[in-house]
Image (spheres, rainbow, N blue to C red):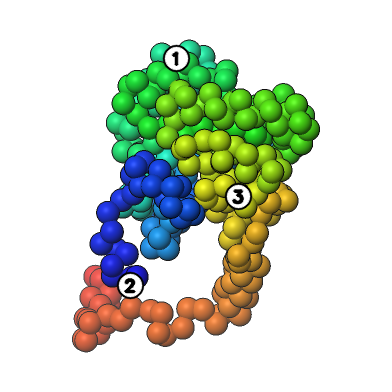
Amino acid sequence: MTKEAEKQMPKKTVLDFREMKTKGDKITFLTAYDFPMASFCEKAGMDMILVGDSAAMVVHGLLGTVPMTMDQMIQHSQIVRRGAPATFVIGDMPFLSYQVSRESAIENAGRFFKEASVDGIKLEGGRRVIKQIEGIVEGGMSVMGHIGLTPQSSGQLGGFRAQGRTADAARELIEDALAIEKAGAFALLVEAVPPEVGRIITDRLSIPVLSIGAGMYTDGQLLIIGDMLGYFEAFTPKFVKKYANLAEIIEKAMREFGEDVKSNKFPEERHCYRMLDGEYEKLQALLRKTLSD
């Protein structure tokens, strides 16, 4: 397919993702939090973009996702939508925007759709958030579930640790997955579980199952943009493959800029604007007149 043809393709829908699962076509999924990265995702042909609450760490320099607010997530989602108008964008429900009640979950999900024009929202948790998922779906909105390592409740899990590594724990995840599908979610994100568990969940669900560290047998893959491009250096999860090392490139460019400024190598003549012909002489005459007055 040519790049021109790709540009003309309409935005994918939940039905397209269901069909991709049926055909075995893998779904590509990246996070984005700003206009440039959203634009790059769209140009690269990503199927989905997640405006993740991982912005807390990648953008805001926080230690976890819990501090992110609805207003912050709405703003990031608005920016991403402007950068990727033809890509399926999912807004990530921040901590306490849906846990308090079914009603608050519906209201806050609605804000993403009304204020940021997202195509779906994502929330964390299994059977304990089924009422919230059902309410949002009944409100006419598309929901992606998220189980396994759920960062907002990582304290209960003992930190950022892989999940589903025992038979009992894996069975609990499978039951969560089935409940989320029954509640009406259009897709499920599974994070940091063994590939065998990811495979069982994928095989048992009719909705697409996306992996972030859940192995190669799922219907698609998600990575955090800062991890994938190698510019987020605080930590790198085991499941990340770095496709670039932008941190090294960016630091090198900044050092060269600093050296050029200090040694007066930048700016050069070619980086400067010129006055119109004859205007500099006029300016000098005006200044001489001003000084003589």
Number of the front mark, 2 or 3: 3
Q: Which mark is residue 217?
A: 3
The x and y percentages for residue 277 are 21, 86
The x and y percentages for residue 10 are 27, 54
**With respect to residue 232, does 269 lie above or below?**
below
- Disc 1/disc 2 C-alpha distance (Å): 45 Å
Q: Quadrant of the N terminus?
A: bottom left
Mark with earlier residue (2, 3): 2
Q: Which mark is residue 102?
A: 1
Tell me the kind of residue under disc 2. Thr
Label 2 packing within 10 angstroms: few (<14), some (14-19), many (20+): few
* Callout 3 secondary element: loop
Asked if residue 195 lies left or right of residue 179, the reply is right
Q: Residue at x 69, y 43 (%)?
A: 196
Q: Quadrant of the C terminus?
A: bottom left
The x and y percentages for residue 81 are 35, 46
Q: Residue at x 73, y 51 (%)?
A: 238
Q: Is residue 122 visible?
A: no
- Disc 2/disc 3 C-alpha distance (Å): 29 Å
Q: Quadrant of residue 169?
A: top right
Mark with earlier residue (1, 3): 1
Tell me the kind of residue under disc 1. Arg
Q: Residue at x 46, y 37 (%)?
A: 207
Q: Which residue occupies the foreground of this view, 219 or 107?
A: 219
Q: Which mark is residue 2?
A: 2
